[in-house]
Amino acid sequence: MAIDVREGISIAFQAIRTNKLRSFLTVLGVIIGVTSIMAIVSLIEGLNRNMKAQIASIGSDVLYIRPFRPGAFVGGFPDSLRRRKWFTIEDAEAIRRACPAVLAVAPLNFTEARLRYRETESRFTNIIGTTPDFLVTNTWAVANGRFFTETEVEHRSTVCVLGKDHIEALFPHVNPIGKTIYIGGYPSTRPWDPISAWS
């Protein structure tokens, strides 16, 4: 048995020496094939991790509800759905009251505007109108200062929270807390320092 194994190995090495180019191409093909499979597996694993991280950053237990936007959907939906009204603060409060399992409800309103402090103006940026529950639903935290309160929301106080980029653009050498900025031409006082996730 041992003799047969030795003879087989000897014949195999003899064949490799005799057909060097064919052997090289065979080995090269195996290397390329294995490397390609490993690269594809690594790419898929990376995409999976990235997707999981994105879902975790949003929150796997967060549900977003929004009405139809004109032009955003085509076909298959009745006019009764297309003409639904936009949500209100009262709708958010109704969800909070009627759904005890819901930890937090944060209505969102979006617009775009420039921010200005004295003579310095930012580029157009997304402005989010929301409530303090926004920190809960997005699992964010304020890096410095504090977020605005329910009382400030109820009294429609002109306060805001700035992201890191806007702090650097508008207040490169100044503490922004307590200063007044203009959002789209309207004053908003006491911008509290950045939400770290915005950086």
Image (cartoon, rainbow, N blue to C red):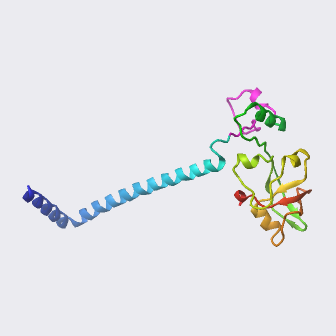
Q: How many marks?
A: 0
Point 73% across, 26% down: residue: 78
In the rendered image, which quarter contains the C terminus? bottom right
168 or 121: nearer the viewer: 168
Is residue 182 within the magenta segment?
A: no
Left or right of 177? Residue 77 is left
Residue furthest front in the image: 100
On the image, the x and y values in percent for residue 198 come to 72, 58
Residue furthest bottom in the image: 173
On the image, the x and y values in percent for residue 144 come to 77, 62
Point 15% across, 65% down: residue: 14
Q: Is residue 18 above or below residue 103?
A: below
5 or 60: nearer the viewer: 60
110 or 167: nearer the viewer: 167
In the rendered image, which quarter contains the N terminus? bottom left
On the image, the x and y values in percent for residue 193 come to 79, 61
Q: Quadrant of residue 178?
A: bottom right
On the image, the x and y values in percent for residue 173 come to 82, 73
What range is drawn magenta here? 63-85
Q: Quadrant of residue 22?
A: bottom left
Q: Quadrant of residue 195?
A: bottom right
Which SS does the magenta portion mostly show? Answer: loop
Q: Is residue 24 visible?
A: yes
Left or right of 56? Residue 171 is right
Left or right of 121? Residue 23 is left
49 or 152: nearer the viewer: 152
Left or right of 14? Residue 177 is right
Is residue 74 within the magenta segment?
A: yes
Point 67% across, 29% down: residue: 76
Q: Is residue 100 above or below residue 187?
A: above
Point 36% across, 60% down: residue: 32
Q: Is residue 86 visible?
A: no
